[in-house]
Amino acid sequence: MDQHRRSSLLTLAAMAFASAISLPTLALAQQKEVRWGQWKGTEVGEKFMGELKAAFEKDHPDIKLTPVDSPFTGFHDRAIVLHQAKKLPDVLLVQVDWVAEFADLGMIEPLDERIAKEPKEFFSNIPETFHAKWKGKQYYLPIESGAVALFWNTDRFKEAGLSGPPKTWDEFAEYARKLTNPDKRQFAITGTLQAEPPTNMTYDIYPLLLQGGATLMDPATNKAVFNSPEGVAAIEWYIDRVNKDKVSVPGVLSNGEKEKRANFASGNVAMMFEGPWGVAIQKQLNPNLNYDIAPLPKGKSTGTMVRGSLNTISSQAQDKDAAWTFVKWLSGPKGIEMWAKGSGGFPARTDVANQDWFKERKLFQAFVTQMAQPNAQSPFLSMPNAVQMNKVMSTEIQNAVQGKKTAKQALDDAAAEWNKVLSAAK
């Protein structure tokens, strides 16, 4: 081989090698980044979050997903501070209570035009609860769902001679008294009236109002109406269980979600009002605990609160198309299935919840039943400042339990404050 030909071949080989090693570099240079602000990392674990990231990036190699994890406590307030500093992540996970507030603050983007471009089955398989719009616009897609139901300790019930969970308010009161023995530090429930987070109202109070036959807000007048005779009777019933029967762990005003879950996991508390997210939490706290889950006891009616974790696109997203690609992927069939299996959450899509693998998760079936019953509601999605409104309710229920106000006075005062917020948001 002559010198000139050999030199040409070496030059071609060098060019080919340089081209080969530059391709990944070029791909990385063109790769978009989506920063996902959320609080789930510590709950689901780094391993699963890494698997989720890898699965998304495999389907969308042009996008780098960067989960940004922060503690749930204080997440709402931190998000507002980040917005003010113009440092919001591209995608922001929110609670149902924050949607209207964040929309009004200009923190999150409407998704209607993007959803309209998707196949009909994409959005139709998302539960109707999460079709609720704020001021005519859809700002979110859910990644998990669930309603409050009744967790009950099967060992404690057996010891008390009870064969199953209470189905009515009367049975609940009777069973609660039998399950309470202060000398042994055993109680029926943990009343959760702690002021922070104000979402504590989700568990004890709001479902009870609905079960008593009350309505939280009148959609025709956009006014709070829970201070009806039915609402007052429901709160009086609750106060009797706490103050008269003393079936709750002491410290009702300072007990919150953390205390409630720890008390139930210890085995000394027989019942807990909790959502499907509590299954994974109990598994971490006490994998050997024997318990089952049933729909909440019925008063004049059934009733529960439906909640969920929702993804939104922030108004400060660097690439809103890339952000939508992630939001759509995680709320689509593949993403929801992976999230539900890996996190232990309740699927926020009917086409996933109807799959055989989920039907085999027996503990979750009570939530399916609960969400299909009348008065399974998520009023928070149409509350203009739900966090503040929940704080008002927390304060007034505390006043009633402490005897500072009658149940009627407390609910009247709470309704008056709610109506100020609702009127200002028109």
Image (cartoon, rainbow, N blue to C red):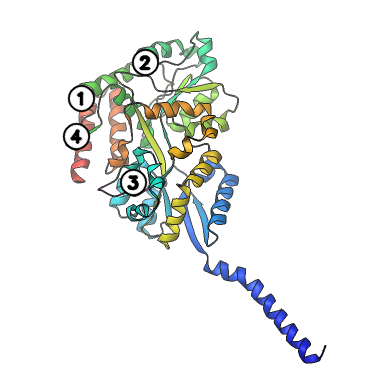
Mark 3 neighbour density, 10 Å: few (under 14) some (14–19) many (20 or more): many
The residue wearing badge 2 is 168
Point out the tag, 2 or 4, that comes first from the N-terminus: 2
Point out the tag, 1 or 4, that comes first from the N-terminus: 1
The residue wearing badge 4 is 416
Image depth: mark 3 or mark 4 in front = 3
- Indicate which disc residue 99 carries: 3
Q: Residue at x 51, y 52 (%)?
A: 67
Q: Classify residue 422 as left or right of residue 249.
A: left
Q: Position of residue 379 (x, y in %)?
A: 30, 36
Q: Are marks 2 and 4 in contact (CB under 8 Å)?
A: no
Image depth: mark 1 or mark 4 in front = 1
Considering depth in this image, is 298 or 404 the residue closer to the camera? 298
Point out the tag, 3 or 4, that comes first from the N-terminus: 3
Considering depth in this image, is 77 or 12 the residue closer to the camera? 12
The residue wearing badge 1 is 228
**Element carrying mark 2:** loop
Disc tally is 4
**Element carrying mark 4:** helix
Q: Position of residue 402 (x, y in %)?
A: 31, 23
Q: Which residues are magenta?
A: 135-140
